[in-house]
Each structure stands twice: as C-alpha cells, then as structure tokens.
Amino acid sequence: MPQRKIPQHYAVFKQNLLDFIHTPRFRAIFVFGVCLYLVALFALLRGNAYYLDDWVRSMNRQGFSGFSRYMATFLVEVLNLFDGILDISPLYQLLGICFLTLASMAILYALNGGFSFWGIIALAPLGLSPYFLQNISYRFDCATMSFALLCVCLPFIFRKNLVVFCAASVVCLVFSYLSYQAANSVYIVLCLFFIFVMTVESLSKKHILAFVLSCAGSFVLASGIYKVIFVRKTDINSYASDKMLSFSEMFGGGDICKHKHLFSSLA
C-alpha cells in the first residue's frame, strides 16, 4: 500500500465509524436492545449463581492469560481497577449485554445501512441462542466473551472498502482471539452470509471474489499473528490446547479418541 494512501484509508475508516455511530436512532436502538436482552436474561441475572469456572476464579482471582486470552485479563482487571479478579456481578453481565447489543447493531448496519426495532429483535438470537447463553452464564467471562463477539462483527461495517475491511478484520480478529478464541467462528459465518447477500444482489463475480479473498486473507493473517506471537504452549491432553490433529489422526479416528478423552475426564 503506497504510504500516501494510508491517510485516505484512515479517513474512510474514521468516516464509516462516525456514520455508524451517528446513524439516526442509534441511541434509541441501543437502549431498546439492552432492555430486550435484560428482559430475556433477567432470570439468569436474578439466579445469582456461579457457573463452572466461576468457582475456581472466585477463589484464585486469576485472569485468563493461561489460555492466551490476554485482552480478557486486561479488560477484567480494568473493571476491577487492577486489584485482581473480583466478583462485581452484575456489572460483568451488564457490560456483556451492551457488547451484545452493539454487535447486533453492527450486523444490522452492515446489512441495511441503518437500524430498526424489528431488525434488532430479529438479531436477538445472536446473544440468546443456547450456545451463547452458556457463555453469558459465566460471571467472570461473559463480558470478555461478548467483547470478542463484538470484535468479529465490527469489521463488516467497513465491507464496502476492502482495504479498510481487511485492516479492521485483522486487528479485530486478533483482539477477538485475545478475548475468546471460539468467537472466530462467527466471523466465518458472517463472511459466508455476506457472500450470499452479495450474490443475491447480483454483484459482479470479480467483486464477490475480491471479498472472498479479503475475508480469507484477513482470517489467515490474524490467526497467524495470534499463533506466532501470543499463543502459550499448553498440554496436548488439556481441554484447551494449542495443538492440531495431524492429517493421519484426522482420518484415523484421532478426533473421536480426543473427544472420548475429554468426556472421560468429565465423568
């Protein structure tokens, strides 16, 4: 990229971000989305229960760096004024709900260029699906997991400028990996979704191919940066590992054996 074009792309990035924030009814939709999630998750908040890792984290007050989630540790420590990891619920859950609402709004804006009440209702399953309900059940993890989800949704508001989209995707994906690695799957699904949208809109094959390559290149680059720079070595038998199955293991039942080992450790 010529150096003289960097200020131009930055100006596009800044303008797109400001357009997103200054879109009509931004505040109204945000408040509505937060209230929607509060009503849906009220029983969970009212339950006031510890879930799985919460017990251990409440006792050792340690962060998430052991799983190479340094951004998650930093965010939680900021909330606790760098005094260790404390139980300040429901602040974690409320912050997580705000992140979920912004993630829904980012997808809605990337799709329609604006917001609507019916649109935010339609996107409520983003945070209310059974899969993510488990994540939001954690006291200490819910805010950082929701932040990771927001990170993988934000790049798509820049999708009409592929250079800005690629740069935003790489940065946001790395932040997502540093917060909650599994959120990268949402980025893949959103890429496929917008490829489908572009196909329905009858855009040129060249334009669609450029978007596909931008998505794939950004994902590979961000994953490589995270793998090389940030990932800590972990035990291959741990349920959270930095290892991958070899090709021979993939086709020789290695994945089944891995799952058998994981389930046996839960017994």
Image: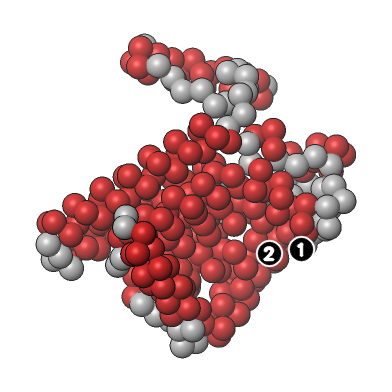
Q: Residue at x 51, y 19 (%)?
A: 258
Which image quarter: residue 208? bottom left
Q: Amino acid at mark 1?
A: Leu
Q: Residue at x 25, y 63 (%)?
A: 197
Residue 217 location, x and y as percent?
33, 44
The amino acid on which the numbered mark 2 sits, given as a three-letter code, is: Leu
Along the line of sight, which residue is nearer the eye, 126 or 114? 114
Check the picture and name the quadrant holding the C terminus. Answer: top right
Write down the residue under mark 2: 95
Q: CA distance from mark 1 to mark 2?
A: 6 Å
On the picture, is 62 further left or further right than 220?
right
Estimate how packed mark 1 is, as few (under 14), some (14 to 19) or many (20 or more) residues with alpha carbons within 10 Å.
Answer: some
Mark identifier at residue 91: 1
Q: Disc 2 on helix, strand or loop?
A: helix
Q: Position of residue 196 (x, y in %)?
A: 24, 58
Q: Residues within 10 Å of mark 2 (few under 14, many from 20)?
A: some
Q: Residue at x 51, y 57 (%)?
A: 151
Q: What's the coloring here?
A: secondary structure
What x and y, as percent, mark residue 120? 47, 73
Near-viewer residue (110 or 81): 81
Marks 1 and 2 in Cβ contact (< 8 Å): yes
Tell me the number on the disc at residue 71: none
Residue at figure coordinates x 47%, y 78% from the top left: 18
Q: Nearer the viewer, residue 219 or 122?
A: 219
Q: Quadrant of residue 245?
A: top left
x and y percentages locating residue 243 in the rendered image = 51, 23
Q: Is residue 214 visible?
A: yes
Q: Nearer the viewer, residue 4 or 157?
A: 4
Residue 86 appears in the picture as rendered:
no
- From this view, report whether residue 19 is shown above or below residue 39: below
Q: Secondary structure at mark 1?
A: helix
